[in-house]
Image (tube, grey):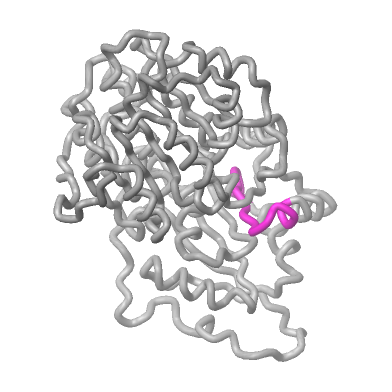
Amino acid sequence: MNEPNPTQGEASQPNKQYDEMPLHETLRRGVKEMGYTEPTPIQAKTIPQAVLGTDIIGTAQTGSGKTAAFLLPILERLLREPTGRIYALVLTPTRELALQAETFLKKLGRHTHLKGAAVYGGVGMEPQQRALRGGAEIIIATPGRLLDHMSRGYVDFRHLRILVLDEADRMLDMGFIPDVRDIVGRLPRNRQTMLFSATMPPEIVRLSREFLNNPRMIRMEEKTVAAAGVSHRAILVEANRKTSILSDLLRQEGMDSVLVFTKTKHRADRLSFQLQKMGVRAGVIHGDKSQSQRVRALEAFRNGSQRVLIATDIAARGIDVEGISHVINYDVPHEAATYVHRVGRTARAQKEGDAISLVSREEQDDFDRIEQFIGMAIARENKTDPNAAPQAPMGRFSQPRHRPGVRPPPRHRYQHKF
């Protein structure tokens, strides 16, 4: 496959309503019935190119609207195809993302004859087998489970026309790239391929050179998307007091729907146990939980029966819940871009949201990099123990909130990003 051509640049961003997009009336009806009228920037840039069959590389963060950016062109291109064959394959890293995309596909394509199915591990094979034997035209799958089905000999991709690699950087992080290469090697070479990734590390660039042919590059600005509608603040605290501080926060008024991030699965489980001892119930979602456990925890969080959900970054890629009031970083992420993905879970649908980080002394360097990445200084509240033994200065924690020469990114919002 050819290397991406940077001279093609980004597609222009027309200021269009969905009615003006190159989509069939049945698809516009589906969008309207979901309550949306204006495409997000990634949709406005991607859809006109994708419906033409162009290969796409899109850098877009969680919450930018990329799911519809590739599902709508898939539906548009397959409207006149007969049923009973697999025409499109979407590879995604987690079960939650597969289910989320399947839900949107059903809503967007409700007035078409096209059917989609999610294929992922942790559940029985038979319903998925029926879909893969001709029961669905669009397959949304995690790589490992799809390979399990392919090894049994009944998956027919001879008619495949469209491949989407969603959250490619997360698939890289989770070690799925060998499986992805195995799958793609068995697909027709004459196809449209779209690759979406929140970041574009060298490994993903190399992957795009393998799989895509003369693609259109579409880039979204990370910093602007991250800042829209989110109020950021930090609480300086010793590492061993984070749980008690978090417990106090969760008891405050307005903590209606709170997503708490930890770095590891073990810390998520331990934090849930500790909070429960303090009288705070919290669901947990991470890769070691069974599918039924994850679905129950996510549904309880979505319907409000449990207002606190503890998650790891990998599991959280599949969380698309409206009305999250707060994102709390129990652990400060090492990568600044991960912070952007986390806080993007709140302030959706033109609403405000709060992002709170519990920052220990050991995490100050990571937190400084986050401030530099998002282009703003974050207000801090010092809750370190005054009776604790003297330690080294907190570095930039003593600096004022507004730094000379740092201009916060412009605040603007789009409709709920699906």
Horizontal arrangement in the rendering, residue 352 relative to residue 241 (left or right):
left
Q: Residue at x 27, y 29 (%)?
A: 37
Horizontal arrangement in the rendering, residue 49 relative to residue 110 (left or right):
left
Residue 220, x across and y down, in percent: 29, 52
Write the start and end of the magenta stretch as one range.
Answer: 253-268
Q: Nearer the viewer, residue 43 or 74?
A: 74
Q: Is residue 54 magenta?
A: no
> Which image quadrant for residue 308?
top right
Horizontal arrangement in the rendering, residue 388 relative to residue 302 (left or right):
right
Q: Is residue 267 magenta?
A: yes
Q: Residue at x 55, y 20 (%)?
A: 153
Q: Going by the picture, which residue comes out furthest to the right? A: 277
Position of the N terminus, as image quadrant, is: top left
Residue 236, x across and y down, in percent: 62, 74
Asked if residue 102 is positioned above or below residue 166 in the image, the reply reads above
Q: Nearer the viewer, residue 221 or 55?
A: 55
Residue 181, x across and y down, in percent: 46, 42
> Which image quadrant for residue 357?
bottom right
Residue 320, x across and y down, in percent: 50, 38
Position of the C terminus, as image quadrant, is: top left
Asked if residue 354 is positioned above or below residue 307 in the image, the reply reads below
